[in-house]
Image (cartoon, grey):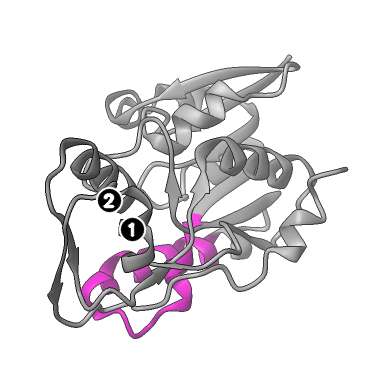
Amino acid sequence: MNKVLITGATGFVGQWLVRLKPVNLTIYGIGRAKYEAMEWTNERWTYIIHLAPTPPTDILKCGERILYASSGIVYHPENEVRKKYRDSKIEGEAECVASGANVVIARLFTFYGKGLDDNKAVSTFQKAGREGRPLVISGDGTTTRSYMHGREMARWMWAILKHGERGEAYDVGSDFPITMLELANVYAAGAPIVIQGGKDPMPYYMPKDTAKTKALLDK
């Protein structure tokens, strides 16, 4: 039996991975309480997908094949606001590679779809536009992101787990840039758009190389 352990399975990424799992896999998803109980370490897993915001130390000992969820934040040393989070992901990636385990890394960017926190840009703009309330933009409106649906994100991550090269990191995110002002206009439906102004600590956040990931999708 191909058993897959997903840590942090109750979040957005975990929900989509479970929803779109390959048919030949049996999923065991655990949240924080079960992760901290450490009972899962008593088993050997065919695959582990580590989404929980903890170091990968323990999971590296228990999986025949491991996918470590990192972040595109590793490309952005200028973002001092999220320095601690960025450092934790860099350290996690380094630990994975140094361990010698059969591990691949997914650097996640920005997503949308069912299950995402209501404070994210797409869901916030959707709700405000639907209710006719002002769509409020922090910054000057030029902050640029790209948005991949959870369905596509899950497809990419399963491909990385199955076919990614050991020790390699793969970007997961859309190639199509959109500014916050452009995004607000998509959902405004006649509602006013308010630009608050100010400086964004990370004005441009896009994948650097999706070609390497896309090459895995048809294998």
Q: Decide whether the magenta segment is chiefly helix, strand or loop.
A: helix
Residue 70 screen position, x and y as percent: 48, 57
Q: Residues within 10 Å of mark 1 (few under 14, many from 20)?
A: some
- Please provide the residue range marked out in magenta: 70-95
Q: Secondary structure at mark 1?
A: helix
User: In the displayed structure, does residue 128 sit left or right of residue 22?
Assistant: left
Q: Which residue is mark 2?
A: 188
Say the numbered circle drawn on residue 2: none
User: Which amino acid does the dot numbered 2 rest on?
Assistant: Ala
Q: Secondary structure at mark 2?
A: loop
Residue 74: say if magenta. Answer: yes
Residue lying at the far bottom in this picture: please name it. 78
Q: Which residue is mark 1?
A: 185
Residue pictured at 72% horizontal, 57% vertical:
213
User: In the displayed structure, does residue 157 sit left or right of residue 185?
Assistant: right
User: Which amino acid does the dot numbered 1 rest on?
Assistant: Asn
Q: Would you identify the image quadrant in which residue 23 lies?
A: top right
Question: Which quadrant: the N terminus?
Answer: top right
Measured along the vertical axis of the image, is residue 18 above or below residue 209? Answer: above
Measured along the vertical axis of the image, is residue 5 above or below residue 116? Answer: above
Residue 152 screen position, x and y as percent: 61, 41
Measured along the vertical axis of the image, is residue 154 above or below residue 211? Answer: above
Q: Is residue 195 visible?
A: yes
Q: Residues within 10 Å of mark 2 (few under 14, many from 20)?
A: many
Residue 73 screen position, x and y as percent: 42, 69
User: In the displayed structure, does residue 70 sit left or right of residue 26?
Assistant: left
Residue pictured at 53% horizontal, 67% vertical:
94
Residue pictured at 30% horizontal, 79% vertical:
79
Q: Do tag 2 and tag 1 residues touch (Cβ < 8 Å)?
A: yes
